[in-house]
Image (spheres, grey):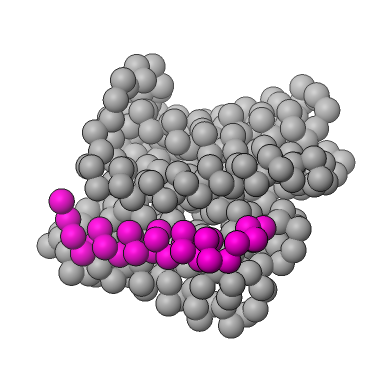
């Protein structure tokens, strides 16, 4: 399977659809009777004054989520190849994105983090233009607006604002106007939200939006034991990827090195911003899929022992399908 996706062949799209279906077939046999889809945060609920939480049946919900994942996988693949992040054209980023998106059952349905992945990918496209751009003020302003928009859908996305400043540190010499323009972009969206609150006589509650930011970071999170088992091959591949990256790091172009550093920081921001939610949901980690898919693709593209990397990927696929059929 890995060998097929190593080359950039348009026919790989068909294989991608096959993997997409394979990593979701088990969930069809355990799909719940009702699946809630919460599109926006409670503080932005006034912007969508209709009942929509159960407008989709579970099967339609899952189908729509699969379509979104497929589109996102192709976008990530285009991003990686367009900016030559892996050094050669390949379909591996799309394969890894689709595979990781089927890792846990909550990943398979519509959710705000899944919607926000479109915004994250959009931000990545903008960040990649910072390195040789003449003026980054418009880019950071747009990125600030994207983060604010994502915060309306899913409040922990607010921490992606840090990625804007990290990108500026990595790609640009210091210019205070570029740093401030991101803040202005973010403030633009919430200024209009404040106006909406005022027009609905709720401006006195506007400050409540920011209270979760003061929440204490939890000492532990509760995850089912089978989820830990699924993470074993994921952690193995990530460890091998970072080892491979360390070997080739200084052989790469400066822009590529900085791009991988940015992806690493985005991965960390996405992983550790879960605590802002009132209740922990594992679908939060959908935000980690885009950078993780690029790391996975790097390892599988440059790994030399075919029997090992094919077996490792097969283990990951089997684990995903097995735990979808068997709930513990």
Q: Is residue 260 magenta?
A: no
- What is the magenta segment's predominant secondary structure? helix
**Farthest residue, direction left:** 33
In depth, the one of 259 and 199 nearer the eye is: 259
Image-quadrant location for residue 30 = bottom left
Rendering coords of residue 277 (x, y %): 33, 32
Compare residues 243 and 96 and report the one nearer the observer: 243
**Residue displayed at 24% across by 48% down:** 226
Q: Is residue 303 above or below residue 238?
A: below
Vertical relation: 40 (above or below) 32:
above
Magenta-tinted stretch: 301-328
Quadrant housing residue 80: bottom right
Q: Is any part of residue 12 visible from this angle?
A: yes
Q: How many marks?
A: 0
Q: Residue at x 28, y 56 (%)?
A: 105
Left or right position of 124 against 26: right
Residue 263 in sight from this viewpoint: no
Instruction: Left or right? Give the position of 175 relative to 233.
Output: right
Q: Is residue 11 left or right of residue 61?
A: right
Verify whether residue 313 appears in magenta.
Answer: yes
Pinpoint residue 150: horizontal percent, then vertical percent.
48, 42
Q: Position of residue 160 (x, y in %)?
A: 54, 35
In the image shown, does 99 or 44 lie closer to the viewer? 99
Residue drawn 73% across and 28% down? 169
Horizontally, residue 284 falls left or right of residue 244, namely left
Q: Is residue 215 above or below residue 163?
A: above
Which residue does the image show at 65% across and 78% down from the upper left?
Answer: 9
């Amino acid at each position: 399977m890995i060998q097929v996706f190593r080359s950039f062949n348009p026919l790989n799209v068909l294989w991608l659809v096959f993997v997409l279906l394979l990593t979701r077939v088990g969930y069809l046999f355990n799909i719940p009777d009702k699946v809630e889809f919460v599109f926006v945060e409670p503080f932005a609920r006034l912007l969508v004054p209709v009942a929509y939480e159960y407008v989709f049946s579970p099967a339609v919900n899952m189908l729509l989520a699969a379509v979104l994942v497929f589109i996102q996988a192709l976008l990530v693949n285009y991003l990686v190849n367009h900016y030559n992040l892996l050094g050669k054209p390949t379909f591996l980023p799309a394969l890894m994105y689709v595979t990781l998106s089927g890792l846990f059952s909550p990943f398979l349905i519509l959710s705000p983090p899944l919607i926000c992945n479109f915004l994250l990918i959009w931000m990545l496209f903008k960040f990649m233009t910072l390195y040789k751009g003449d003026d980054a003020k418009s880019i950071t302003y747009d990125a600030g607006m994207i983060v604010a928009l994502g915060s309306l859908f899913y409040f922990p996305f607010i921490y992606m604002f840090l990625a804007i400043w990290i990108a500026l540190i990595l790609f640009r010499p210091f210019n205070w106007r570029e740093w401030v323009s991101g803040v202005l972009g973010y403030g633009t969206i919430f200024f209009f939200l404040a106006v909406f609150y005022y027009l609905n006589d709720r401006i006195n509650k506007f400050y409540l939006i920011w209270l979760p930011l003061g929440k204490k970071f939890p000492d532990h999170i509760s995850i089912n034991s089978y989820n830990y088992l699924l993470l074993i091959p994921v952690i193995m591949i990530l460890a091998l990827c970072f080892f491979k990256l360390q070997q080739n790091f200084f052989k790469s172009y400066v822009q590529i090195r900085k791009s991988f550093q940015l992806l690493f920081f985005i991965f960390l921001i996405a992983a550790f911003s879960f605590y802002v939610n009132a209740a922990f949901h594992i679908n939060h980690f959908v935000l980690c899929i885009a950078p993780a898919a690029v790391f996975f693709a790097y390892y599988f593209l440059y790994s030399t022992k075919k029997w090992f990397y094919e077996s490792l990927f097969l283990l990951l696929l089997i684990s995903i399908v097995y735990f979808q059929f068997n709930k513990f």
